[in-house]
Image: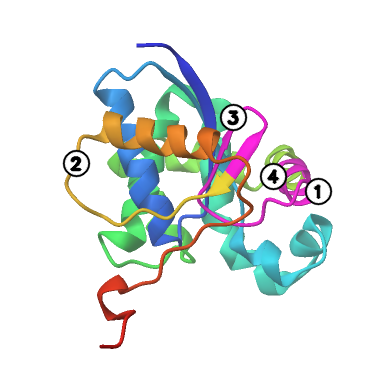
Amino acid sequence: MTTRAFAITYDYRCPFARVLHELTLDGLEAGAGWEVTLVPLSLNLQLVNSAEELFADSRHRRALLALEVSAAVSLAWPDRHPTAHRALFNVFHVNGRSLYRPEVLTAALRSVGLDSDEVVALAGSMAVRDHLLATFQHLQDRGVDGVPTVITGDTAALVRLRPQACDPVSRVETVLDVVEGLDFLDELRRPGDPAQLLVS
């Protein structure tokens, strides 16, 4: 299989991000020949004018915690990031716990064998803040403000998949084909219940 390089944005609060990221992680574990970059992007960016404003406003502080933890793992322990990434998605979507509580995040880190004290220390550092700030600003400057956005080559698209049993490799490959093949579209949305669209 030809190696494909792509990136996917995420915020751990988004259920659609979880679906696509789970499929991608499953595909990688199954041996898919992908070069994947997992890119943090706070949904709170939609509420402010700039990434700088997001970090300066204390009202957004809690919403950044999980992304700071994730960035810390990605920067210092990149080989452990996929496992931690899955665990952080599970905090809310599987276990029903709050992503805004530091003790919940540290428990998730410990569950996958990471030293939570080391991760939390790095997560609160200027290095992680600067990394996230630069990442958020870069995406925002290019019009990317949603998750999960798939970025491949010069093309990007917000992709929301319905959760269903499938082969993860073929599903992600199909998503990539669509994103790359429909670069002439600005937006494509499907209604929630197509069966109810037509009135007889």
Dot 1 falls on a residue whose secondary structure is helix
Q: Earlier in the sequence, mark 2 or mark 3?
A: 3
Q: What amino acid is at disc 3?
A: Leu
Dot 3 falls on a residue whose secondary structure is helix
Q: Which of the two discs, 4 and 2, sits closer to the camera?
A: 2
Residue that carries the numbered disc 1 in the rendered image: 141
Label 2 Cα crowd, 10 Å radius (few <14 / some 14-19 / many 20+): few
Query: Are discs 4 and 2 less than 8 Å apart at CB?
Result: no
Residue that carries the numbered disc 2 in the rendered image: 166
Q: What amino acid is at disc 1?
A: Asp
Q: Position of residue 86 (x, y in %)?
A: 34, 43
Residue that carries the numbered disc 4 in the rendered image: 132
Query: Are discs 1 and 2 less than 8 Å apart at CB?
Result: no
Residue that carries the numbered disc 3 in the rendered image: 75
Q: Is residue 160 above or below residue 157?
A: below
Q: Could you tell me how many numbered marks the image carries?
A: 4
Q: Which of the two discs, 2 and 3, sits closer to the camera?
A: 2
Dot 2 falls on a residue whose secondary structure is loop
In the image, what residue occupies the spot 26% across and 35% down?
168
Q: Earlier in the sequence, mark 3 or mark 4?
A: 3
